[in-house]
Amino acid sequence: MSAIVAIVGRPNVGKSTFFNRLIQRREAIVDAVSGVTRDRHYGKSDWNGKEFSLIDTGGYVVGSDDVFEKEIDKQVELAIDEADAIIFMVDVESGVTGMDEDVAKLLRKVNKPVFLAVNKVDNVQRQADAVEFYALGLGNYYSLSSINGSGTGDLLDAVVKELPDIEEEESELPRFAVVGRPNAGKSSFINALIGEERYIVTDIAGTTRDSIDTKYNRFGFEFNLVDTAGIRRKAKVKEDLEFYSVMRSVRAIEHADVCILLLDATRGFDGQVQNIFWLAQRNNKGIVILVNKWDLVEKETNSVRDFTAKIKKAIEPFDDVPILFISVLTKQRIFKAIETAVDVFKNRSKKVPTRKLNDIMLPIIEHTPPPAYKGKYVKIKFCTQLPTPYPQFAFFCNLPQYVRDPYKRFLENKLRENFDFSGVPITIFMRKK
């Protein structure tokens, strides 16, 4: 579980460049992720050995300047609610603007660590110009240039020093998080399961206050159910802002073993639902997709098969994910949904014995070896599953750098065909033997 750091500030001060700089460094180290992040507003970074999640609030606002003012205030408020630390970015070229003053006013009231970052300081003259930001009343500032990276180290040193140590509370029980956009029926689903009105359900989006854990023990299953609790009711919040659902889901997803992604069939598998899906996938969580309110869909134009195919197309290449059509209202298939989540949990913690793995995979590899690259032939000699909480496999070969993504996907598909990893992302590493 990592702390959350939010980057706020008006448009065009360089938030995204800064964000990308921190994320890329890490993504480059972790593994060149194919098709890099789908939504470029959330990522993980680490500094001095401390890992944190980073959220760039800037990517979510679209609109003219006047819309902007309101949106920025909302985002800053949300960041204040949800993040453990806030980086407020301003730009030395334009100096202190009215919008900066607005944001500073909100941030001065906060009892969380706020770091004022003055961007685009890349020469001595600008270093001198930065002094005027003392006027924002937020104390010391950090001058940096997010384009060339100078000064980011000092800022990050200060940030990680202030981040809380979030202890992973040890729970033997698997944690299932029910995620999805507001009003998809998450709380009703949990009520239907638990069979008691422990959550007050109304039809206003976002009436659930905070994520609530429920210990669940029925039908021989025992686990914790986490309701990611739409959005707190704030009169000011325009419900539809994608940012809110994503920000709200981040914590719950990082915290869960399996994410039960609930979507409203009448709205389809839209961009916001996809963002939540990729968030769970990038965090290597088990995933079950539940299509709720299927009873309300025009059956003539939509068949289960077509709808399933549409979803699978949208989530390629990771499309080995169970998709169930349910109705929370009539309780149709909701227990099947939990059984499936339990299966996915088991798949996620499955360990394949090395010998069995080699007995099955080596003949497949021999039959279809990696394509030669620049006249060099790759020979894979041995494979093993790594001792991690979710499935990762290492394949040992003479020239790991020549194995391309399509072949890794081929290996992944063969692993899925021979061992059931339905609903679980798999990572494959090529290692020098």
Image (cartoon, helix red, strand yellow):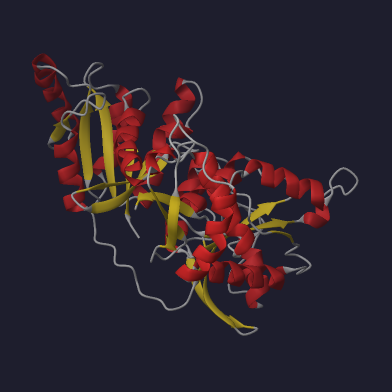
Quarter of the figure with the N terminus: bottom left
Question: Percent from the top left, x then y, of residue 294?
Answer: 78, 55
Q: Using the image as rendered, state which of residue 136 and residue 355 is in the foreground.
A: 355
Q: Is residue 270 visible?
A: yes
Question: Percent from the top left, x then y, of residue 60?
Answer: 47, 34
Q: Using the image as rendered, state which of residue 388 and residue 365 is in the foreground.
A: 365
Q: Residue at x 65, y 41 (%)?
A: 314
Question: Percent from the top left, x then y, of residue 348?
Answer: 51, 66
Q: Is residue 229 visible?
A: no
Q: Based on the displayed image, in which of its 4 quarters is residue 70 positioned? A: top left
Left or right: where does residue 258 sit relative to residue 219? left
Question: Percent from the top left, x then y, of residue 74?
Answer: 43, 39
Left or right: where does residue 374 sit relative to residue 227? left
Residue 72 vs 296, above or below: the answer is: above
Q: Residue at x 54, y 40 (%)?
A: 406
Q: Residue at x 70, y 73 (%)?
A: 335
Left or right: where does residue 69 sit relative to residue 296? left
Q: Using the image as rendered, state which of residue 377 and residue 360 is in the foreground.
A: 377
Residue 386 vs 133, above or below: the answer is: below
Q: Using the image as rendered, state which of residue 230 and residue 302 is in the foreground.
A: 302
Q: Based on the displayed image, in which of its 4 quarters is residue 7 positioned? A: top left
Q: Residue at x 74, y 46 (%)?
A: 309
Number of numbered markers = 0
